[in-house]
Amino acid sequence: MHPDVLWFVLALVLAGVYLSWTAGRLDRLHARGDASRAALDAQLVRRSAVAMELATSGLLDPASALLIADAAHAARQAEGEDRPPAESDLSRALRAALDQPQQFEELTSTADGRQLVDELEAAARRVGMARRFHNDAVAAARALRSKRHVRYLRLAGHAPPPLTFECDDAPPECLARVL
């Protein structure tokens, strides 16, 4: 066999191995993005559940309780493109209700209130971490999908491009001070 043919076959085999490895990596990145989205959804549901529990606890004034309950209910019911704005509204409602010094002091003066505040702080922190982790996974998948050889050879197949989750997830200042 001619040496040029051997080099050509070797180059084709190496290119095939590289493309197969790239396709597998892209598949793993998509799976990581799906898993991180599921974890983010779980944390968002947990935060809205704790917010609803706080709103129905009777420890807040009626206006604040109604504001938080409405936002928590809307966040739980929202799907698709409506979800990020609803989650942002919940964050804003929590800040509006809890960033009043007198209200926060009254809330944390009881053991039940202190427990709810601790749960809400943990849930808010986890939402922020889960959102950043998800967006990092999406960025990694998009970066690989943007490579020329991945696009030209359609290594992503028919998988839709992953989407980031952008929302206002900043916790109330009073919860940041508790830490």
Image: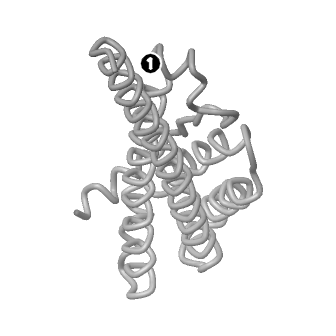
Query: What residue is shown at x 37% (from left), y 67% (from top)?
Result: 122
Q: Which scheme is used to colour this image of the protein?
A: one colour
Relative to residue 53, is residue 168 drawn left or right? left
Placement of 169 over or under 67, stated as above or below: above
- Mark 1 element type: loop
Which corner quadrant holds the N terminus? top left
Relative to residue 20, is residue 60 drawn left or right? right
Placement of 135 over or under 154, stated as above or below: below
User: Which residue lies most toward the front here?
Assistant: 1
Q: What is the tally of numbered marks visible in this picture?
A: 1
Placement of 165 over or under 71, stated as above or below: above
Residue at numbered disc 1 = 147
Which corner quadrant holds the C terminus? bottom left
Where residue 66 sits, quadrant-wise, is bottom right
Query: What residue is shown at x 50% (from left), y 23% (from top)?
Result: 150
* Residue 73: percent from left, percent from top: 73, 61
Where residue 118 sits, quadrant-wise, is bottom left
Along the line of sight, which residue is nearer the eye, 77 or 93? 77
Query: What residue is shown at x 44% (from left), y 67% (from top)?
Result: 120
Where residue 175 sits, quadrant-wise, is bottom left
User: Which residue lies most toward the bottom here?
Assistant: 111
* Residue 21: percent from left, percent from top: 40, 39
* Residue 15: percent from left, percent from top: 39, 25
Identity, as a three-letter code, of the amino acid under mark 1: Lys
* Residue 100: percent from left, percent from top: 42, 54
Along the line of sight, which residue is nearer the eye, 101 or 34? 34
Relative to residue 13, is residue 7 drawn left or right? left
Placement of 78 over or under 123, stated as above or below: above
Residues packed near mark 1 inside 10 Å, few (<14), some (14 to 19) or many (20 plus): few
